[in-house]
Image (cartoon, rainbow, N blue to C red):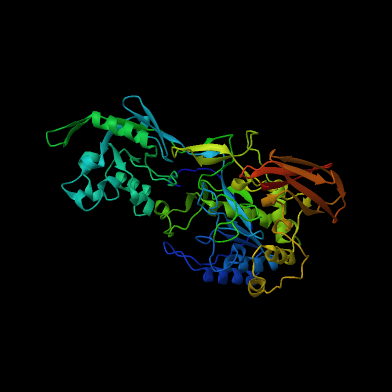
Amino acid sequence: MHGYEFGKASGMAPRARIAVYKVLYRLFGGYVSDVVAAIDQAVQDGVDILNLSVGPNSPPTATRTTFLNPFDAALLSAVKAGVFVAQAAGNGGPFPKTLVSFSPWITTVAAGVDDRRYKNHLILGNGKRIAGLGVSPATHGNKSFGLISATDALLGSSSTKYSALDCQRPELLNKRKVQGKILLCGYSFNYISGTASIKKVSQTAKSLGAAGFVVAVEDSYPGTKFDPVPVNIPGILITDVSKTKDLIDYYNSSTTRDWAGRATAFQATVGIADGLAPTLFNSAPQVALFSSRGPDVKDFSFQDADVLKPDILAPGNLIWSAWAPNGTDEANYAGEGFAMMSGTSMAAPHIAGIAALIKQKYPKWSPSAIKSALMTTANTIDKGSHPLRAQQYSTSEMMTLARATPFDYGSGAVNPKAALDPGLVLDATHQDYITFLCSIPDVDPSEVSNITGSRCGSGPKGQRPYDLNIPSITVSQLKGIQTVKRTVTNVADEAETYTIMTRMSPEIALDVSPPALTVLPGSSREITVTLTTRSVTGTYSFGEITMKGDRRHLVRIPVVAMGFK
């Protein structure tokens, strides 16, 4: 891109055949009915895997429970037809209950930050070094050049109608003044609304003969995702407001002005470093700041559900991928063949591709068996052998890192190699999902049968939502002692004996019986899990059940509960 090779990349399943269904439009979005029609069409066309980098704006109001909304009901039919479904968790993080994917038959994917970051810095003439984002070459000969602000390069009174600070319109700026200097531009709301772009700044600077450009953020915009943009001339974005102040103070103190405030001499100089090569970190993966967080909700009043969401973490930050040159969704990549994007929309296709590989290896596996293989083999430790951490906001709205929980990453970061050989799976049938729906308190059985075509009452009596045989256990209201069962099936070629261990926060006691079990190939065994409230804290407790095989397999089941008296 721009004549520079950033590296070699591959999709998760490079030989997969891809079908794309158009349901959404830029700025407008779309209708759930179109999404449902596309899901039905895809299933009819015989797809094996569905990737949905889309979701509703909020929990649905039309049905008694989130799990029966038209979106999730259509996906339940897809799963019944044997189609695995990966869906983006949403980009409403780091705040709780921001998920747009709700149901246990869907694999809900959170976004992780991997070990590759693009960093750059600006060197001021006074020796100060200011960190920023800029996937760009260094200033010519690694030298410093004069700095000129767009406001000081204006032609006449052109600032009245257009914001020259954005540096989007080269005809508003004096080429003679800008030529050979670094152009200093402001960052406005136009960048967030999509009417201004870094790519356009680079084109403006290039057309004026500038040696490079700096875009400086003067006002904080909470929740803004600043992603580095590859450009073909030296350029950098300063996102830290305090660093922008340092830069502007230096510029003002180095610029001579006449009685009317017009600049007459520019003494400020800056150099931009080479930002083309990534920096690699060991503290990866991390849960991305924007990735939507649990707990899952069961209705529009945001009552906690007995289902763990998200399910799994996959790479979703600064993802390089192919891009349609005529695509209009992102002004920074107009006309390009590749783009680097962030979002849970980039994380979900990783899981879709890995699921395709599992489906290829085990064509007869159900979607829930594939989901189980992904979840029970996921990692909760980063590359540096530390527990996974999640990006959060501190009290002062600065980004910080905190120890991640299952509400951030589900069962952990996906481990594709291990998922291809999980040892045990926790399977669930379509009837199990119907029983789950019928077990939700206050659900209307006629609503279940109208939407799913299956009646309540045919499953076991006295079921609770957390009895569904999924590879996680979530009890949102643990009153006293509760017993939960899970059934594991050996999908390996040989018998294996598993030793079962538990770990849980001290407020909740977690016990599993039997302490060990041998499972024959193709056979299933049941484990009984007992959760006991020891103390009431009003917060969730986290733990896990680990089943260690005597051959090579390790199976993890996350456990989440909030104790009540």
* Left or right position of 288 against 511: left
Task: Give me the residue at 58% from left, 66% from top.
Answer: 71
Q: How many marks?
A: 0
Tell me what residue is drawn at x 69 percent, y 66 percent.
438
- Tell which of 31 and 493 is nearer to you: 31
Task: Tell whether 267 sits left or right of 36.
Answer: left
Residue 52 location (% of width, % of height)? 57, 60
Residue 118 visible in the picture:
yes
Residue extending farthest to the left is 259
Q: Position of residue 78 (x, y in %)?
A: 65, 67
Vertical side of 415 occupied by 265: above or below? above
Measuring from the top left, give residue 48's x and y in whole percent: 67, 64
439 shown above or below 555: below
Residue 328's x, y, as percent?
41, 59
Q: Horizontal placement of 67 versus 154: left or right? A: right
Q: Residue 538, located in which quarter of the rendered image?
A: top right
Residue nearest the observer in this picture, 173 or 335 = 173
Residue 278 shows in the view: no
Residue 11 vertical placement versus 182 (above, below): below
Give the residue at the far front of this rendering.
565
Seen from the viewer's position, the closer of residues 252 and 224 is 224
